[in-house]
Image (cartoon, rainbow, N blue to C red):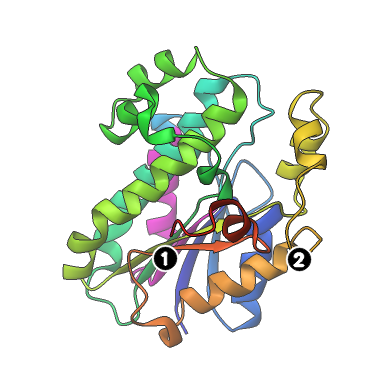
Amino acid sequence: MGTTVVTGAASGIGAAARARFERDGERVIGIDLRDTDVSADLSTVDGRQSAIDSVRECAGDGIDRIVLCAGLGAHIEDLGLILSVNYFGTIALLDALLPDMAGRQGAAALLIASNSVQFAPFGDCDFVAAMLDGNEKKARELVANENGFMAYGGSKYALCCAVRRRAEAWGSEGVRLNAVAPGATKTPLLQGTIDHPLYGRGLKGLKAPLGRRAEPHEIANLIAFVQSEEASYVHGSILFVDGGNDAATRLDQF
């Protein structure tokens, strides 16, 4: 097997992904605010660099795969913080660790997006454009005019764009790059949103065609497959795993 880096490894989908990789015999380096191998605050430039340096020190002879799960939900009051963690923290690690994976057999990277990208025209948002331009200060200023749902969904939409925009360059380096877009999954992030007086009402009424919410291990199972050699031709893809919500919502749009 090899070495996989997982952010958000202390809880939710990240913890489930870590458990699945370890069960498969992978060496895992976990990153989170606490309770894992590398403690780092991905909302700050210094925290991101600390995580990158620590991961390289832990990995020693290189990194085979990265799975970037760290994120904040729509219920977080500081909208700029949502963008800093969900998008800028993720992209900083993603791009910094590409050289550590380039040329390694089976190298692959995966981001956690969200099926919420389907629910609003995020591509028209100025704060999303600022994210994609790499301007964190401007993005944080612009998102202050939005709400938590827009900040969360916009950050995940930008991640999807980032995957597609990097597909050609990453492919030439021999590193596959994909995103998984989960629907409502039983995690602390989801519970925090459910408990919010505004966003909770909408989530409680949102039913997937399969009639239930996902368990974290169900998302982790897809992550493990996409990161494996069995998915060696899957690249630049956004994979919805949402119990059919995307299909039911967008029908013929795919």
Q: State the SS at label 2.
A: loop
Q: Which residues are magenta?
A: 47-69
Which dot marks residue 210? 2
Front-most of residues 63 and 210: 210
Q: Residues under labels 2 and 1: Cα distance?
A: 40 Å
Q: Is residue 239 left or right of residue 136?
A: right
Q: Residues within 10 Å of mark 1 (few under 14, many from 20)?
A: some
Q: Is residue 230 left or right of residue 173?
A: right
Which dot marks residue 59? 1
Front-most of residues 248 and 11: 248
Question: Is 224 situated above or below 191?
Answer: below
Q: In the image, what residue type sits under mark 1?
A: Ala
Q: Is residue 207 left or right of residue 61?
A: right
Front-most of residues 128 and 111: 128
Quadrant of the drawing holding the C terminus:
bottom left
Query: Does residue 94 belong to the magenta stretch?
Result: no
Would you say the residues marked 2 and 1 are in contact, meaning their CB atoms lie under 8 Å apart? Answer: no
Q: State the SS at label 1.
A: helix
Question: Is 191 situated above or below 187?
Answer: above
- Rendered location of residue 176, percent (x, y): 32, 70
User: Which is more foreground, mark 2 or mark 1?
Assistant: 2
Residue at the location (29% across, 25% down)? 135
Q: Residues within 10 Å of mark 2 (few under 14, many from 20)?
A: few
Residue at the location (25% across, 55% down)? 166
Q: In the image, what residue type sits under mark 2?
A: Leu
